[in-house]
Amino acid sequence: MNLEAFILGCGGMMPLPHRHLTSVLLRREGELFLFDGGEGTQVSLRRLNLRWKKITSIFVSHTHADHVTGLPGILMLSSQVDREEPLYIYGPPRIAEYVEQSRRVLDMYINYEIVVKEIEAPAVCYEGEGFRVRAFPLRHTKPCVGYALEEDPRPGAFNPDRALELGVPRGPLWSRLQAGETVTLDDGSTVRSDEVLGPARSGRKFSYVTDSLYFPEISKEVAGSDLLVCEGMFERALAQSAVEKKHMTAEQAAMVARDAGGVGRLGLIHYSPRYAERELKVLADEAREIFPETFLTRDRMHIPLEYKD
């Protein structure tokens, strides 16, 4: 089952010619989940040729302009096609007011149902088949949440030789064993799934953290993430500015990843516009001193999430 992230925008505060505002799309076996929708989101969706009409849910971190100004266009764009499924929007308090006021002031034509759900984090805000999306509180200048999409553990690997030894013929019974069932053979004996399956294997985890003051508790929320996308807005020399504005430095993002345990890769995002493209290297260098598996996200970057086992 495919799980892949697309960086639609990696900038913070204001868009730059080659850097749209923060937005990440997660595709899981055809389902599309959008995390924030900054200015320029539609441009990246089009350039990546993603099927935006398949977006089923939008998860908003907070209602600062650089994270939501792309949403009205997405809502109106979805009215240009036949859409029968509702669009769900999750976010902290006031996201419902923002959506409603945008629809009213812009006199939007909407021909599908929009369901807005405000979150009091921590909470599981979305549950799908075999996974869930969990929200957790961050510390910013207004209510803000991070998100983690977590898959259920997978059954262990199936041992066909062992199944044959136990008398289970090839065919439908193998599928039932792989699904965790106990099967009955023609002679009346039974075979349990744990007799032919190895140890349970982990699912995958994607975490999204922006914008927030650094605090150690973030690490436990993102522990075990195969991919952590986390803001690294400033370099170490501007740590005091980060505190005042309730943002993180790249170094602090790396501390989150390091202390979490089990994080596979850290993708920095939400860069201050003070950094030109060639100057972003300082953010990556400072973060890699603490967490070597750090990289700079870029607009329209594609990042597959693979199973660990």
Image (tube, rainbow, N blue to C red):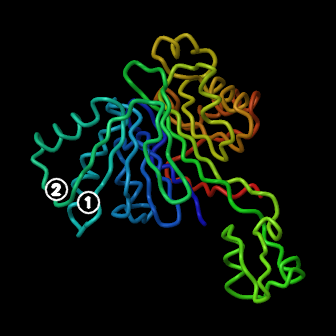
Quarter residue 101 falls in? top left
Secondary structure state at the residue bearing disc 1: helix
Three-letter code for the amino acid on which mark 1 is drawn: Ser
Q: In the rendered structure, which amino acid carries the disc numbered 2? A: Ile
- Kindly state the secondary structure of the residue where label 2 is placed: loop
Residue 247 placed where, x, y %? 50, 21
Q: Which residue is pictured at 59% across the width and 31% down the height?
A: 279
- Residue placed under numbered mark 2 in the picture: 110
Residue 222 point in image, percent of width and height = 62, 36
> Residue 253 falls in which quadrant of the image?
top right
Residue 268 in the figure: left or right of residue 114: right
- Determine whether 157 is above or below 304 in the image: below
Which numbered circle lies on residue 243?
none
**Is 176 on the left-hand or right-hand side of 269?**
right
The numbered disc on residue 78 is 1
Residue 18, above or below 216: below
Whether tag 2 and tag 1 are in contact, CB under 8 A, the answer is yes
